[in-house]
Amino acid sequence: MASLRDIKSRITSTKKTKQITKAMQMVSAAKLNRAEMNAKSFVPYMEKIQEVVGSIANGSSGGSHPMLESREVKKTGYVVITSDRGLAGAYNSSVLRHVYRTINERHNSTDEYAIIVAGKVGLSFFKKRGMPVVESIVGLSDQPAFADIKDIASRTVGMFEDGAFDELYLYYNHYVSAIQQDLTERKLLPLTDIETGGGKSLASYEYEPSEEEILEILLPQYAESLIYGALLDAKAAEHASRMTAMRSATDNADDLIGDLTLSYNRARQASITQELTEIVSGAAALE
């Protein structure tokens, strides 16, 4: 049985750990509120640009662009969004396990795919396994601006346009609520299944100069916006996952403190009982 001093020491250290996890929970909750607002405020822009692009791509005039057309797949790109830090429950592991399994099922050689990764956790994961990472970004703020990822998003889309990739997939955690984040796999390019607005009545557009010239500028911006929108969504999911993980850790610390306190009291009672027994035995021996 552990000594009273050992149990007391464990109670003290667990209480200190609880203070840390409680503070991290509160910080993540504050960050989640802002991240959720950022993700939701970006949705109207995405819906409108999707409506315009879809209107041109699916219109009667048949506007065309290489980013809208499927081609023979010789190499696949995977855009994976993770976090820079751990202590976020299954936030990173769920995405990384799924991507790792998917790549192993689809490809027999590292020449058949390449990875673009956001976050130190994902970058470390793929490098340790010798998987080809062609682009990476780390150190993003908790509330990233589009300028923070503009370069890597532009290079990623450019690699598809240049033929380095024949298709691009996007993997991230979609924020549903504070207690639910769904693993999401999305085909980023080519944009073969772009919709115009979910069946809603759409505005009529006149295009100047031509639809092809507009698509030439608008489609890369749209693809880059899809990456940025996924990043905002993933950041909200990250903060929610970390808040939930820290809440669970705090609750577990409370349970452990309760168990240790009970063990401490029992050990202390046993020690007092033993001392009383020794005193009574000593007094009886003197009679």
Image (cartoon, rainbow, N blue to C red):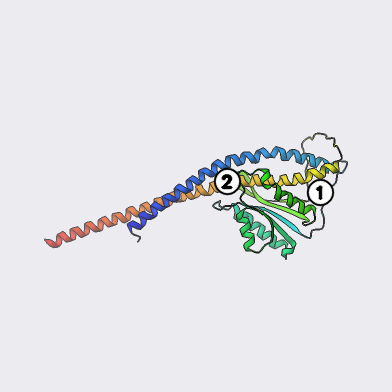
What is the spatial separation of the Cα atoms under label 1 and label 2, in whole angstroms?
34 Å
Residue occupying the point 19% across, 58% down? 279
Residue, far left: 287
Residue 156 position within the rendered picture, expressed as x and y whole percent measured from the top left = 73, 52
Left or right position of 240 against 44:
left
The relative height of residue 214 versus residue 2 in the rendered view (above or below) is above
Contact, mark 1 vs mark 2 (Cβ under 8 Å) = no
Between 271 and 88, the one lying in front of the other is 88
Point 29% across, 57% down: residue: 270
Q: Quadrant of residue 162?
A: bottom right
Work out whether residue 259 can be spotted: no
Tell me the quadrant of the picture where the C terminus can be found.
bottom left
The residue to which callout 2 is attached is 239
Residue 57, image x, y percentages: 83, 43
From the viewer's perspective, is residue 37 above or below residue 157?
above
- The answer, for residue 140, to whether it is visible in the render is yes
**Label disc, if present, on residue 113 of the rendered structure:** none
Camera-side residue: 227 or 145? 145
Mark 1 residue element: helix
Q: Residue tagged by mark 1? A: 68
Q: Which amino acid does label 2 sit on?
A: His
Along the line of sight, which residue is nearer the eye, 221 or 176? 221
| Residue beneath the point at 72% across and 53% down | 169
Image location (x, y in percent) of residue 23: 48, 45
Comes first in the chain, label 1 or label 2:
1
User: In the figure, is residue 204 to the left or right of 252?
Assistant: right
Secondary structure of the residue carrying tag 2 is helix
